[in-house]
Amino acid sequence: MSRFDSLQCPIPIADYPIVLLAHGGGGRLMHELIERIFRAAFHNPLLDTQHDGALLPLDGERLAFTTDSFVVHPHRFPGGDIGTLAVYGTVNDLLMCGARPRYLSLGFILEEGLPMETLWQVVCSMRDAAERAQVQIVTGDTKVVDRGKGDGIFINSAAIGTVAPGLQIGPTSVRPGDVAILSGDVGRHGMAVMAVREGLEFESAIESDCAPLTAPVMALLEGGVEVHCLRDLTRGGLASALIEIAMARQLTVQIEERAIPVDGEVRAACEILGLDPLYVANEGRFVAFVAAQDAARALALLQRQPLAANAAIIGEVTAEPQGLVTMRSVIGVNRILSLLSGEQLPRIC
């Protein structure tokens, strides 16, 4: 008998109906699911770092390893498709560990009846994305499910990267006095997907920020900046990423709303749909926590990169109170940011 067989499920079904899990990641329910189910069952020192990937010691070297899955609907959106999303999203998770991405595996779950032309377009997008991200696709798997049992195509990915000696980048390295730097405007990816899904039209199309973050991240690391933590702003957006880091480290992140860049079309789309851009997903943005003495230099290095040209310092870390994210609004009022009960936008990555 497994040692788990006699244990009671740590999340009562009456309190958390299984249907709510369809909302995906980024919200309070998914956070509790991860904490009370997966970490409770699988906890170990490598997993408990609560990072975007695991850092694995191997013969004196360190490898970073990560995995992800992609179910975006629709499969194609302005600025990318499910293929580019899978490559860049996985590569970016490695970069958030301070790793240089090397090798990528891909698993395809295809629904019976998927047009071969559609599959070919996705595969070609992935080939081009891998070349841009400077990774090799070296292994994979394909499964076909019955018609009506999938949504055309789902993709699972895993990747390996190498970490330079001495780097300790992750939530546990964040400390009071650190400065938070945002690499660019937020909410673009989620709104690009939703604009297509909802048939919204604007003066100019909102394009996803989907991109590999190799250049701006390596600019920081190779520039000698004392980087303590990196986090890409995917499901749950900027707010959820900051909250997760604050909770993991039991420190407070104080941010300024007026310092956070949001594109005008993105803001308009959020207002139409009743969404907060701070919680909308991004696929080409990250937040960096750096030592205060390196903040100005880090910002200058980022702003030289096309993907981070409008990077901005948005806040700092304090010791008290613990485990919170507070934001001073444009009118000077402070409020506490909280994890949403669900995800604002399901199926956007």
Image: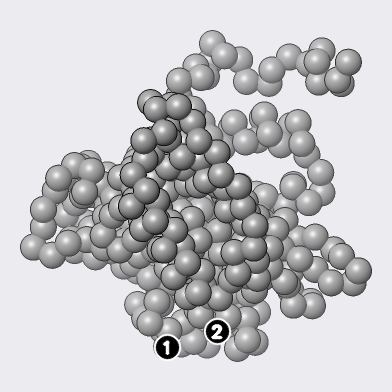
> How many badges with numbers are in the image?
2
Residue 284 at x, y = what percent?
42, 65
Q: Is residue 180 left or right of residue 75?
A: right
Determine which quarter of the picture holds residue 305.
bottom left
* Residue occupying image coordinates x 45% and y 27%: 146
Task: From the top left corner, tell me how far across and down residue 68 is, in percent.
Answer: 57, 49
Kind of residue sitting beneath label 2: Ala
Element class at badge 2: helix
Q: Is residue 122 left or right of residue 226?
A: left
Name the amino acid type tagged 1. Arg
Mark number displayed over residue 43: none
Furthest residue toward left: 203
The residue lying toward the viewer, choosing from 170 and 95, is: 95
Q: Quadrant of residue 103?
A: bottom right
Where residue 50 appears, as percent x and y from the top left, is 67, 50
User: Would you call the spot at circle 2 few (<14 residues within 10 Å), some (14-19), or many (20 or more)?
Assistant: some
Characterize the local packing of mark 1: few (<14), some (14-19) or many (20 or more) Cα atoms within 10 angstroms: some
> Where 247 sits versus 328, above or below?
above
Q: What colour scheme was applied to this rendering of the protein?
A: one colour
Please tell me which of labels 1 and 2 falls first in the chain: 2
- Say if mark 1 contacts mark 2, CB within 8 Å: yes
Question: Is residue 208 shown left or right of residue 54?
Answer: left
Secondary-structure class at tag 1: loop
Q: Is residue 224 visible?
A: yes
Label 1, label 2: how many angstroms apart (C-alpha)? 9 Å
Circle number at residue 304? 1
Q: Which residue is mark 2?
A: 219
The N terminus: image quadrant: top right
| For residue 5, above or below residue 218 | above
Residue furthest to the right: 59
Q: What x and y, as percent, mark residue 273?
A: 20, 42
- Where 62 falls versus 145 (above or below)? below
